[in-house]
Amino acid sequence: MELIRPIDAYATEERVRKFFKYEWERLVMMSGSSMTDLKSPSFSADPKAQNLDNAAESKLIMHIDAGSIVKDVIRTINTMPDKYQFLLKARYIKGLTWLNIEEQLPYTNRELQRKINTAFLYFADGFKMKDLHVYIEEIEP
């Protein structure tokens, strides 16, 4: 029995890439924050106290859930090794393009792509709110 199930690295990288491409900015907006807020060193996705009716309560629950996910994304990125942390912060927090990032680094395009893929794998390993891994199904002999 293995403690860590084997993953399909390529499929996991793609799943993380899609998370950032299709869900990330929407979650930030649903949390009541903006991409500019994330750049602040004092960023907090915690909701403010309010008097609520049922419809507003449902929206607040969605806001709290989105806020929790945003906070976990930030926590996960902040706990990654520095060179991978830099890549994800530059792209998904600061909003730089991959071309802008490539111009700042001494890597070839291919080396940068490998580091980005590794960063996505680190992210999948550290993210607690949703399992972004794609597991290799065990094949019976």
Image (tube, grey):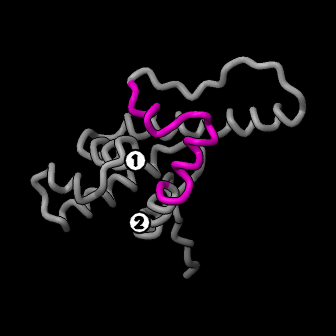
Locate the N terminus by quadrant.
bottom right
Q: If you read the primary sequence from the N terminus, does the residue marked by circle 1 or circle 2 appear first?
A: 2
Q: Position of residue 18 (x, y in %)?
A: 50, 62
Which disc, if any, is residue 122?
A: none
Q: Is residue 43 visible?
A: yes
Query: Which residue in the protein does label 2 denote?
Result: 9
Q: Position of residue 72 (x, y in %)?
A: 52, 37
Corner quadrant of residue 121: bottom left
Secondary structure of the residue carrying numbered label 2: helix
Range drawn in magenta = 20-40
- Against 130, residue 40 (above or below) is above
Q: Give the residue displayed 63% in from the left and 41% down from the top.
A: 30
Q: Is 56 on the left-hand or right-hand side of 16?
A: right
Q: Amino acid at mark 1?
A: Tyr
Q: Residues within 10 Å of mark 1 (few under 14, many from 20)?
A: some
Locate the C terminus by quadrant.
bottom right
Q: Is residue 1 visible?
A: no
Query: Which residue in the protein does label 1 denote?
Result: 92
Q: Position of residue 76 (x, y in %)?
A: 44, 39
Q: Is 76 on the left-hand or right-hand side of 137?
A: left
Q: Give the residue displayed 46% in from the left and 31% down from the top.
A: 37
Q: Give the residue displayed 65% in from the left and 25% down from the top.
A: 47
- Against 44, residue 114 (above or below) is below
The CA span between labels 1 and 2 is: 21 Å
78 and 122: which one is in front? Answer: 78
